[in-house]
């Protein structure tokens, strides 16, 4: 067992790599009654094409999300119900590059952890249950397709990207999931639900050694193969400049997306994530000159905001909200980025934004779920997320301005609109 102490944030993390290749991390919270466990695999919506046993496989869009749903089935019944009866609050999610299963509880934590590790590592599917799930997930997909927030984002991604699998919705389509079988699910589980491709994170008042021993006892002894993946090739040009859809909405809304330079895994992944967040706050935040001016003119309202996202092989920044003049706002975003690059960022404003960003990361340490997800994402992308104070020390105004100059430009922008019918 290794212990790492982070003096800048006052955190200790205990970790051990088990003989089967699984990384286990424990963050102690002695004064809390709640305990939280997060068991995750580096497998998400983007992983539709991969190599298993020397053969490249193309799997249906939405299969990682589908597999997440089916993993709660066991020979003894439903693991969700079993955990709930034990006083736990369980759930799961699938993102583009990760699937996570988790629960929190105050009592019976060790028993609940055994249940979690068992049902995630031992699949149980039947053709009948898989076919039944198609109807349930198909209904979910149809419902979310009626959501304007979902439509505007998915259409923006398809306008930004032409080759990467990130342009495909995580849940897939009604047509794509109709091709999923029990055999396909077993293949994907065999490929990605292996200890060397997973991580267990526990936060709370627990004994780290006991957690390590329990994981050793329950999980398979084999580590599993390293699975090559193909996310597709992606040029820096956008696929299309504009997309517009009429829906039953009372007010038009938009997203302006900017295709940014992708970042390789490692420490630079963390650094660029922080640079992108700072650039987003300086350009689009509620205290930014652009936001204040457009808000005072009544062009945007409090729904306006932006964020920076990173996934395997891609990165993008987007901003939007309810607006009757989306093309003007999109042009204003590009114009403000050009002004900042030309004139520079006010030093006092930059320092306020930087301190606020550091404070937000520090507040995130109060959330058990946030700690677990951040540690997991860091492991999967090859960096230590708890070193964010040191990384902020290395970031300058010039780094932020360089980000704006390179990425927030008109030929990298797409405009996605939803308008009233």
Image (spheres, rainbow, N blue to C red):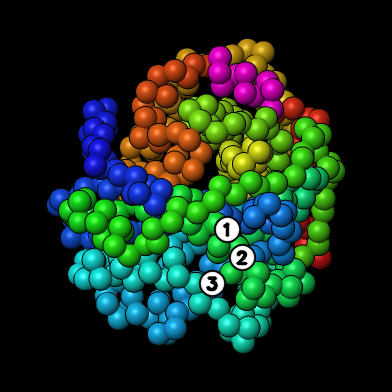
User: Looking at the image, can residue 117 be seen?
Assistant: yes
Determine the residue positioned at 26% across, 46% down.
27
Count the marks. 3
Where in the figure is residue 241, as x and y percent of width and height? 84, 41
In the picture provided, is 369 more to the left or to the right than 323? left
User: Looking at the image, can residue 103 be seen?
Assistant: no
Which SS does the magenta portion mostly show? helix
Which residue is under mark 2? 187
- How many C-alpha atoms fall within 10 Å of the one at disc 3: few (<14), some, or many (≥20)? some
Q: Secondary structure under badge 2?
A: helix
Tell which tag, 2 or 3, sits nearer the viewer.
2
Where in the figure is residue 388, as x and y percent of width and height? 39, 30
Asked whether disc 1 touches disc 3, contact meaning CB atoms under 8 Å apart, the reply is no
Asked whether disc 1 touches disc 2, contact meaning CB atoms under 8 Å apart, the reply is yes
The question of residue 390 being in magenta is answered with no
The alpha-carbon separation of the residues under discs 1 and 3 comes to 17 Å
Looking at the picture, tell me which residue is in the foreground, 261 or 331.
261
Q: Quadrant of the N terminus?
A: top left
Q: Secondary structure under badge 1?
A: helix
Q: Please say if 140 is above or below 399.
A: below
Determine the residue positioned at 30% across, 68% down.
114
The alpha-carbon separation of the residues under discs 2 and 3 comes to 16 Å
Which residue is under mark 3? 69
Give the mark nearer the N terminus: 1 vs 3.
3
Determine the residue positioned at 38% across, 69% down.
118
| Residue 412 in which image quadrant | top right
Range of magenta residues: 398-407
Which residue is under mark 1? 191
């Amino acid at each position: 067992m290794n212990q790492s102490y982070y003096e800048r944030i006052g955190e200790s993390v205990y970790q051990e790599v088990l003989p089967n290749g699984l990384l286990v991390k424990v963050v102690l919270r002695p004064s809390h009654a709640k305990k939280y466990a997060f068991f995750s695999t580096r497998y998400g919506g983007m992983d539709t094409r991969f190599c298993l046993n020397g053969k490249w496989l193309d799997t249906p869009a939405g299969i990682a999300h589908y597999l997440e749903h089916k993993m709660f089935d066991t020979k003894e019944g439903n693991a969700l119900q079993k955990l709930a009866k034990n006083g736990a609050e369980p759930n799961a999610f699938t993102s583009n590059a990760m699937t996570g299963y988790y629960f929190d509880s105050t009592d019976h934590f060790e028993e609940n952890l055994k249940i979690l590790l068992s049902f995630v590592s031992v699949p149980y599917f039947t053709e009948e249950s898989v076919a039944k799930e198609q109807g349930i997930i198909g209904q979910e997909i149809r419902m979310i397709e009626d959501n304007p927030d979902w439509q505007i984002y998915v259409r923006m991604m398809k306008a930004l990207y032409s080759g990467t699998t990130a342009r495909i919705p995580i849940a897939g389509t009604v047509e794509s999931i109709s091709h999923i079988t029990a055999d396909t699910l077993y293949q994907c589980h065999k490929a990605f639900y292996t200890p060397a491709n997973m991580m267990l994170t526990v936060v709370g008042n627990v004994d780290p050694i006991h957690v390590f021993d329990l994981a050793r006892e329950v999980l398979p002894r084999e580590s599993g193969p390293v699975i090559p993946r193909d996310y597709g090739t992606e040029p820096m040009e956008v696929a299309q400049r504009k997309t517009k859809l009429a829906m039953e909405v009372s007010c038009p809304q938009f997203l302006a997306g900017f295709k940014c330079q992708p970042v390789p895994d490692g420490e630079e992944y963390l650094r660029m994530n922080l640079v992108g967040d700072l650039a987003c706050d300086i350009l689009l935040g509620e205290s930014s000159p652009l936001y204040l001016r457009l808000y005072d003119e009544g062009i945007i309202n409090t729904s306006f905001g932006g964020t920076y996202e990173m996934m395997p092989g891609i990165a993008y920044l987007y901003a939007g909200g309810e607006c009757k003049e989306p093309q003007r706002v999109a042009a204003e975003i590009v114009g403000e980025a050009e002004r900042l690059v030309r004139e520079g960022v006010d030093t006092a404003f930059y320092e306020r934004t930087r301190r606020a960003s550091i404070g937000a990361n520090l507040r995130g340490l109060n959330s058990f779920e946030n700690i677990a997800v951040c540690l997991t994402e860091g492991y999967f992308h090859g960096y230590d997320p708890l070193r964010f104070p040191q990384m902020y020390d290395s970031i300058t105004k010039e780094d932020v301005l360089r980000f704006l100059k390179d990425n927030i430009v008109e030929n990298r922008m797409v405009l996605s609109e939803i308008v009233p019918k």
